[in-house]
Image (cartoon, rainbow, N blue to C red):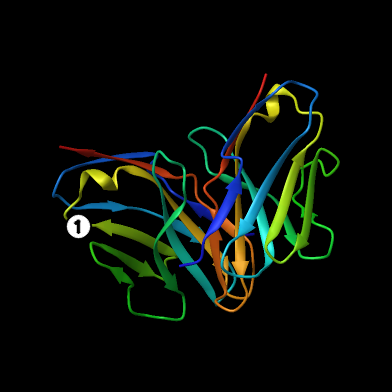
Amino acid sequence: AQTVTQSQPEMSVQEAETVTLSCTYDTSESDYYLFWYKQPPSRQMILVIRQEAYKQQNATENRFSVNFQKAAKSFSLKISDSQLGDAAMYFCAYRVFTGNQFYFGTGTSLTVIP
Amino acid sequence: GAVVSQHPSWVICKSGTSVKIECRSLDFQATTMFWYRQFPKQSLMLMATSNEGSKATYEQGVEKDKFLINHASLTLSTLTVTSAHPEDSSFYICSARDRAWNEQFFGPGTRLTVL
């Protein structure tokens, strides 16, 4: 069974600093996607970054980057130069390459301190 | 980018009544749509998967007679909460898959409060 674990229910970071959110997952599949979604107070799910498991290169999107360790089944999100607008709940998610269903972690609430 | 809308964004109803929530893909055809439920400060829980023109597939523990899902067209899926009770109060989110892009896009959610 596929499971996604986020061991940090809450994190805080000083504005302009860097923070890393952790995520581990369990799967027997070899081809899959990993995602980080942001859910601000509006509750709209926003895709932050996506990683294909077959790609060795870590995905980056501006201030957001991931550290994907396939053998360790680890997928952490690094947010650089944190901004007040980054404050939100962050969910790690997994999807089999050819499948439909997302498996979400329990989320990490990020607070950005001015 | 692809947009998924939900209507209404929030609804308050009396216990025992039924409420319908619509999920629409605005600029793409969604062969598959998903309905999630989210309790405060918790993760998204998949309730069901609906494919256009066929019956929805419900996750274990989700009452199909209580949460009726209809996916009548490639751009519209509806979730009807029948005989709503206060414990059905929650945030409901839909997502839609675009086959061409193999991507899923989330709607903004609907907050249901049952009095």
Q: Could you tell whether A64 is left or right of B29 in the image?
A: left
Residue at image point 84% right, 59% down: B55
For residue B73, above or below residue A21: below
Measuring from the top left, give residue A36's x and y in whole percent.
41, 58
Measuring from the top left, give residue B102's x and y in whole percent.
57, 74
Residue at image point 82% right, 38% down: B66
| Residue B11 visible in rendering | yes
Q: Quadrant of residue A98?
A: bottom right
Residue B95 or residue B12, whichever sits in front = B12
Q: Quadrant of the N terminus of chain A?
A: bottom right
Q: Residues within 10 Å of mark 1 (few under 14, many from 20)?
A: some
Measuring from the top left, give residue A102's x and y in whole percent.
58, 59
Q: Quadrant of residue B16?
A: top right
For residue B57, above or below residue B31: above
For residue A75, above or below residue B98: above
Residue at image point 59% right, 70% down: B28
Q: Which residue is mark 1?
A: A80
Q: Could you tell whether B38 is left or right of B31 in the image?
A: left
| Residue A71 visible in rendering | no
Q: Amino acid at mark 1?
A: Ser
Residue at image point 57% right, 56% down: A103
Q: Could you tell whether B112 is left or right of A18 in the image?
A: right
Measuring from the top left, give residue B2's x and y in whole percent.
50, 66
